[in-house]
């Protein structure tokens, strides 16, 4: 029996506002494609009214691991700054 690895993954992701390249949003999801679509359809109050593109993601095996990493990225300034600097450097 083959394992469907995609369905077993939980993603922490970073979106970039298409019209304001200095605005980013970090979140996590078990269905990354659908989650990005929901952001762009205005189903999230924090991102409503803007168009977003996926610029970074990390995959985790458990939802708890993904939530823990999201929490670190949102609340640890040093870790967040390091990741955002790396992302911005590669987007330039």
Image (cartoon, rainbow, N blue to C red):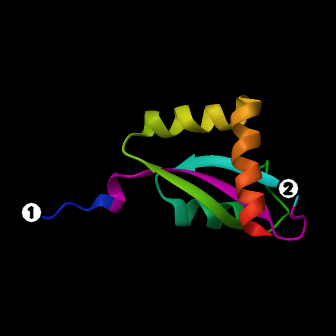
Q: Measured along the vertical axis of the image, is residue 48 above or below residue 91? A: above
Q: Is residue 18 magenta?
A: yes
**Residue designated by label 2:** 23
Judge whether residue 42 can be spotted in this image.
no
Q: Measured along the vertical axis of the image, is residue 30 above or below residue 38? A: above
Q: Which residues are magenta?
A: 6-21
Q: Measured along the vertical axis of the image, is residue 6 above or below residue 77? A: below
Residue 47 percent across, percent down from the top left: 79, 54
In the rendered image, the quadrant that contains the N terminus is bottom left
**Residue designated by label 1:** 1
Q: Characterize the local packing of mark 1: few (<14), some (14-19) or many (20 or more) Cα atoms within 10 angstroms.
A: few
Q: Which mark is residue 34?
A: none
Tag 1 and tag 2, C-beta contact below 8 Å: no
Q: Residue at x 63, y 63 (%)?
A: 36
Q: Quadrant of residue 24?
A: bottom right
Q: Measured along the vertical axis of the image, is residue 22 above or below residue 27? A: below
Residue 46 percent across, percent down from the top left: 79, 48
Q: Earlier in the sequence, mark 1 or mark 2?
A: 1
Say left or right for 32 vs 2. right
């Amino acid at each position: 029996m083959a394992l469907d690895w995609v369905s077993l993954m939980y993603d922490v992701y970073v979106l970039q506002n298409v019209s304001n390249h200095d605005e980013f949003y970090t979140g996590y999801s078990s269905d990354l494609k659908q989650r990005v679509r929901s952001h762009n359809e205005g189903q999230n109050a924090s991102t409503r009214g803007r168009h977003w593109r996926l610029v970074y993601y990390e995959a985790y095996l458990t939802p708890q691991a993904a939530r823990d990493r999201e929490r670190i990225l949102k609340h640890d300034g040093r870790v967040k700054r390091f990741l955002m600097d790396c992302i911005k450097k590669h987007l330039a």
